[in-house]
Image: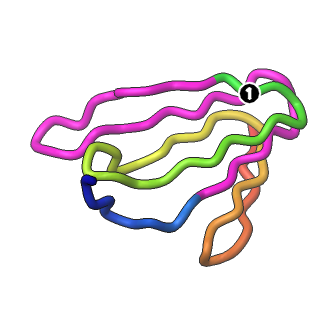
């Protein structure tokens, strides 16, 4: 089993239709490697791994992390 970089999960809950969640890669070149589109009320659980170094969120959403809750906006 491969070891993850951070076993903590990030929970993203869409507050409107069309929230985009984009995973960005690690390494010398940062690239998009995964994207999801969430509708209002949908929830996505994500985590940082050996491949994912950042998560970008576009749209109105609540983000729950081990460090607290954050709200993204348009």
Q: Is residue 27 magenta?
A: yes
Q: Which quadrant would the C terminus be assigned to in this image?
A: top right
User: Circle 1 sits on which residue?
Assistant: 38
Q: Nearer the viewer, residue 58 or 13?
A: 13
30 relative to 20 in the view: left or right: left
Percent position of residue 62, x then y:
78, 52
Local crowd size for mark 1, using a 10 Å CA cut-off: few (<14), some (14–19), many (≥20): many
59 vs 46: above or below: above
46 vs 66: above or below: above
The local secondary structure at tag 1 comes to strand
47 relative to 69 in the view: left or right: left
Percent position of residue 5, x then y:
31, 63
Percent position of residue 8, x then y:
51, 67
The quadrant where residue 68 appears: bottom right
14 vs 3: above or below: above
For the stretch drawn in magenta, the main secondary structure is strand
Q: Nearer the viewer, residue 62 or 50?
A: 50
The quadrant where residue 34 appears: top left
Residue at x 55% of width, y 48% of height: 46
15 relative to 64 in the view: left or right: right
Q: Is residue 48 magenta?
A: no
Percent position of residue 38, x then y:
74, 27
Count of labels in the image: 1
Residue at x 82% of width, y 25% of height: 39
Residue at x 25% of width, y 53% of height: 2
Q: Which residues are magenta?
A: 10-36
Q: Nearer the viewer, residue 62 or 8?
A: 8
70 relative to 32 in the view: left or right: right
51 vs 69: above or below: above
Q: Nearer the viewer, residue 56 or 48?
A: 48
Residue farthest to the front?
A: 1
The structure's colour scheme is rainbow
């Amino acid at each position: 089993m491969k070891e993850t970089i951070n076993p903590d999960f990030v929970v993203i809950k869409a507050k409107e239709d069309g929230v985009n969640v984009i995973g960005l890669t690690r390494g010398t070149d940062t690239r998009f490697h995964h994207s999801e589109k969430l509708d209002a009320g949908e929830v996505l659980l994500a985590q940082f791994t050996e491949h994912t170094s950042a998560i970008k969120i576009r749209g109105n959403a609540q983000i729950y992390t081990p460090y607290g809750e954050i709200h993204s906006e348009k």
